[in-house]
Amino acid sequence: MGGWAIAVHGGAGVDPNLPPQRQEEAKQLLTRCLNLGISALRSNASALDVVELVVRELESDPLFNSGRGSALTEKGTVEMEASIMDGSKRRCGAVSGLTTVKNPISLARLVMDKSPHSYLAFSGAEEFARKQGVEVVENEYFITADNVGMLKLAKEANTILFDYRIPVAGGACGVGVENPLQMNGLPISVYAPETVGCVVVDGEGKCAAATSTGGLMNKMSGRIGDSPLIGAGTYACELCGVSCTGEGEAIIRGTLAREVAAVMEYKGFKLQAAVDFVIKHRLDQGKAGLIAVSNSGEVSYGFNCNGMFRGCATEDGFMEVGIWE
Amino acid sequence: MRREGDMFFKVESEVRLALNKEQGIRKDMGWAIALHGGAGDIPLSLPAEMRKPREEALRHCLQIAVEALKAKVGPLDVVELVVRELENIPHFNAGKGSVLTSKGTVEMEASIMDGATMNCGAVSGLTTVLNPISLARLVMDKTPHIYLAFDGAQDFARQQGVPTLDSTHFITAHNIQRLNQAKQAHTVQIDYTQPIQNYTKKETLFANSDSQIGTVGCVAVDGLGNLASATSTGGLVNKMVGRIGDTPLIGAGTYADARCAVSATGKGEAIIRGTVARDVAALMEFKGLSLQEAATCVVHERTPKGTVGLIAVSAKGEVAMPFNTTGMFRACATEDGYSEIAIWPAAQVE
């Protein structure tokens, strides 16, 4: 065992009717991001640098729900959040309520490295971004036509939709309204759509994790989900690195990311067993997924819902990108 | 009304049945309650004029809590009620009496969790809401979300018609003084250890000594093993605007499930990294530790000295209040008549 390992995700809970073209685009993006990470790892980059680098790439691409391409609030604006954790000392940084910062995950890293705090949000975070001189853009930059359409659908159906990236143009929008996947049998479908994340263990056995999202489509302005919450959406310690995606509220209640590490530490489980245990016991049906790496070079993922966009690779040459079971 | 409450409740009931079987819990173990007004470097030389009002406040809140529990008020309502009371008292760093940001403003945060259903609610960045803990409860009960912050939370407060006051209501002279001292000392009273200047000098008593005092909290269990936890704070003296600490983070500052309820206080970053509140429950669940063992382990073995204190109650009606700081304002009571109000460690080890 040993050697580096990397996993990326683009969200859990995928519409079974997702057009093949979209599936292909998603797989290509995941592959590209994996390769970016692998390349960095081969150049001996640290786990922390790699997770940031990969998530930046995912944020910049409008395909998934983070950075550009983020889901919209009920006001039609974008409010982004992210967190990052360095397993070796359990240092962490998180941000919420970002409206102009091009790469939220990098601001989260700056909170960790350059501020006396762990978590900054809303106007305070935006102010910090300016002081740090990070790249900022107009809020419109993050908004895509697809998502404007999705928001409209969500409002019409008066639900919080999870984001399954069905193209709105060309009459396919009916699919969304007629058949919003009921993940819990209740009117409001509370899925956290296509959050992105990356976990890495580097050549030195150090783990890191990073997660970034625009949150729930049609969310109340000011709503914070699991992605910026250490222990919920993101966690890393000496043993492992974990990033979660799915229904934010369930991930928070289940302190999901932390659970994987707790089960490894307190029950002595190995990575896959810990992931399986957590997915089985800490969640309701149809709610979330996660990716994880261990300090001994293992990579693992699990989800209890309909698909998860993911990819993983290890130093011995293994590589896999997938969406379904 | 809550979305997947039914499913969760079913899961939790099954857990409780299994627990009852495993631990031989009698149907009625008796209620228990604990509350805190913050852990930190509370100097033993704290002058009487500062100590007495706080002790009195703890006594008062304990009494309210005990009366409520005796009247069969549910634990979730009890913890909210007690934390509201603590928020209203200006001597503690929550609600009125909250410490100030670097801009001299107040930004309050809180969270609440219902162990029976695992439902939770949290708020951050409140500036005018009289009782943050009650808004956190409304987020839990009245929205499909768990956590609302800043403008969005304030808008929600307005929609809900909760009592609000101009933010000057929450600011006390004491805290203005603390902020000035912190600025002069060029310190943010922060999450990692800094050499404390002039520690023993009385005039800097406020700036350094109780910089980490803050946060109020309450945990309760009824005779049937239903648990709840609530925590509320103004945060850190001289914090950056927009800074969020451990208090509103489920698993860090607040946690409750079928086994225990926990509320933590101290250095935010240590509590976040250590997922302190969840860890107590996880040790009980995964390693079979008792409440006391789990709480002691988290505070004395898993977090750095001088950073953390917590209060916890178990489904069986036990109480634990360990801390690794100089002191922690705390009080507790159990149905069998035991009660305690204290600031510093008892003679024996916690």
Image (cartoon, coloured by chain):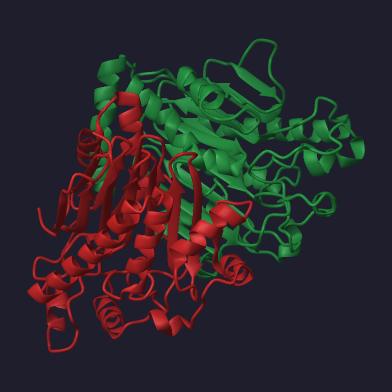
**Tag count:** 0
- B86 horizontally vs A300: left or right: right
Q: Position of residue B298 (x, y in %)?
A: 50, 26
Q: Residue at x 57, y 70 (%)?
A: A126
Q: Is residue A48 left or right of residue A163?
A: right
Residue at figure coordinates x 24%, y 76% from the top left: A157
Question: Which image quarter: residue A310?
Answer: bottom left
- Image quadrant assignment for residue A88: top left
Q: Is residue B225 visible?
A: no
Q: Colour of chain A?
A: red
Quick check: B60 above or below A217? above
Q: Which residue is nearer to you in this view: B128 or B180?
A: B180
Residue B293 makes an appearance in the image: yes
Q: Position of residue A298 (x, y in %)?
A: 24, 39
| Percent position of residue B203, x then y | 91, 40
Residue ID at (25%, 26%): B17
Quadrant where the image shows the N terminus of chain A: top left
| Rendering colour (chain B) | green
In the picture as drawn, the residue positioned furthest to the front comes out as A43
Residue placed most toward the observer, B295 or A86 = A86
> Looking at the image, which residue sits at the far bottom?
A170
Quadrant of the rendered image containing residue B280? top left
Query: In this view of the protein, which residue sits in the foreground, B280 or B36?
Result: B280
Residue A108: image location, x then y, percent:
49, 59
Q: Nearer the viewer, residue A46 or B55?
A: A46
* Side (left or right) of B56 relative to B123: right
Q: Is residue A157 above or below residue B291?
A: below
Q: Is residue B52 above or below residue A159?
A: above
